[in-house]
Amino acid sequence: MAQWYIKEFGKLANVSVRALHHYDKLGLLKPSIRLPNGYRLYAETDLLRLQQILALKYFGFELSEVQALLDKEPDALKHFCAQRQTIRNQIMQLENADQTLSGIIDMLERNGSIQWKQIIQLIGDYRMTTETKMIWGPDLDATKQLEYQQYLVDTGLATQKQIDDCNLKAQSWSEEKVNGIKNEQDSLLKALAVAIDQNLRPTDKAVQIQIRKHFDTIKNFWTPDKKTYQGLAKLYDEHPDFEKFLATYHLQLKPFLVEAMTVFAEKELS
């Protein structure tokens, strides 16, 4: 196994010794090997950790956030998958920015004018923070989001293009909009928990009104049809993460929600 002194390690990764000392002091990256004479060496696993740190810094995270994310998800494969998804989203966003810039340049070269709507679009194209936070953030970590998305693709309930379009759409969202969607979801799940305690059935009108709100919330991301909305209900039913999450509202919420969504899909969607 390869080992490096701090200067060698820094040179290898093009990171200053000062930065490595700082990471060490923060507890973010400590050399794994300690020699009998007191010297410490970096190992290959430290190189992997450093790559993850630098990737998250590149994606716009503060060091305190980097540490929390790495402590939360140590699995290398999942971390690389999350990095790839973030890069893909950035590529899509930059391609959009390139198209917008081409339009602006073309307009200036032809008649010297600027379409201000294009400037607004360009501002939106350059926004990456919101989408990055949504992929890597604490409410739904990147690896889990990728897992759910892959489930939808693998089961034929969504295409990769639909997933990519959904991620791209979210890039322009403000923090206020993200929080608004979360609050809407929280309110309707609480309402469904109350409905269970009131002995309402998934088919009852009051419950279906709440499911309509749930459907409308999902439309912020994409517009499901009958098949994909039933697929989402199946994901809720089969994945243990959702059972744990929904149980925080009511122990019977998962089967209740799944049945109510299935009823809604059958009656309202085509």
Image: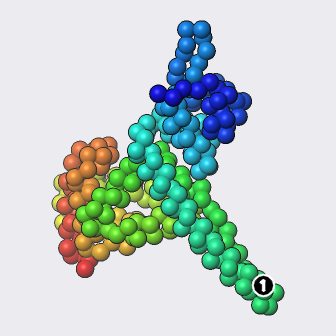
Image point (61%, 49%), residue name: 58
Which residue sits furthest right? 112
Which residue sits furthest bottom? 111
Using the image as rendered, state which of residue 2 and residue 55 is in the foreground. Answer: 2
Residue 225, horizontal then vertical, whole percent: 30, 75
Q: Is 130 placed left or right of 258 in the picture?
A: right
Q: Is 124 placed left or right of 236 in the picture?
A: right
Callout 1: SS: helix
Image point (59%, 50%), residue name: 59
Q: Is 267 placed left or right of 39 in the picture?
A: left
* Displayed quadrant of residue 73: top left
Image point (26%, 50%), residue name: 239
The answer to whether residue 255 of the structure is visible from this angle is yes
Above or below for 1 versus 106: above
Using the image as rendered, state which of residue 200 and residue 103 is in the foreground. Answer: 103
Using the image as rendered, state which of residue 99 and residue 137 is in the foreground. Answer: 99
Above or below for 238 versus 220: above
Image point (57%, 22%), residue name: 41
The three-letter code of the residue at mark 1 reads Leu
Residue 19, horizontal then vertical, whole percent: 69, 33
Residue 134, horizontal then vertical, whole percent: 50, 54
Which residue sits furthest front? 2
* Displayed quadrant of residue 77: top left
Quickly name the residue at label 1: 108
Where's the C terminus, which quadrant? bottom left
The answer to whether residue 196 of the structure is visible from this angle is no
Residue 11, horizontal then vertical, whole percent: 67, 35
